[in-house]
Image: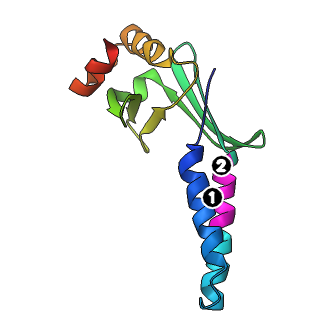
Amino acid sequence: MYYARAQRRVLGSLLFLVLILFKVEEFPQGLQILQLVLAFIIGMALLAEYKVEINEGYLTYQIQLFNLTLYKKVVHHQNIKTMKFKRIGWAQKCVMIKNEKGFPIKIANFNPNNIYQDLIDFANVYDIPVTKTKDYLILER
């Protein structure tokens, strides 16, 4: 089982900005309500936890909030079109898992860090096409 959380610095900065702007009294009432809703959504995103589990023949991707599963997707190996390994940011690895149906799954910032090698092994076992960008290959060295 692999775990990840949202990027807290970015979301925390956004939450701080929204709450600071809430103090501006010149905003209309409707906009202040919208700011509160936005602050609530950002606050919940800060508490969200992402999980990936690699099993025999399928992957399970979950988004949880307070151990309550908000979203769960099970992808069987025959439904995976490709796995694209790429670099995000300065030195972060990312995997985009493209499926036959539905949205792609983005796997980034997961711990432990061996998830990327485990996904490559999973793809090799089930003959899933893997592509690696030049930037990702630099990170592998």
Visible residue check, residue 130: no
Kindly indicate the quadrant of the structure image that contains residue 52.
top right
Residue type marked 1: Ile
Residue at the (40%, 8%) spot, across then down: 125
Q: Position of residue 49 (x, y in %)?
A: 66, 38
126 and 67: which one is in front? 67
Q: Which residue is mark 2?
A: 46
Q: Percent x, y for residue 116?
A: 44, 18
89 shown above or below 137: below
**Residue at the (60%, 91%) spot, across then down:** 26
The residue under the point 33% across, 31% down is 87
Colour convention of the picture = rainbow
Quadrant position of residue 122: top left
Residue toward you, 90 or 108:
90
Does the magenta-highlighted stretch encompass residue 41? yes
The magenta-colored residue range is: 38-46
Q: Which residue is mark 1?
A: 42
Q: Is residue 50 above or below residue 127?
A: below
Q: Position of residue 133 (x, y in %)?
A: 24, 26
Q: Is residue 18 visible?
A: yes
Quadrant of the rendering where the C terminus is positioned: top left
Question: Where 15 falls versus 78 (above or below)?
Answer: below
Alpha-carbon neighbours of circle 1 within 10 Å: few (<14), some, or many (≥20)? some
Disc 2 + disc 1, Cβ < 8 Å = yes
Image-based side of 119 in relation to 26, left or right: left
What is the quadrant of the N terminus in the image?
Answer: top right
- The amino acid at mark 2 is Leu
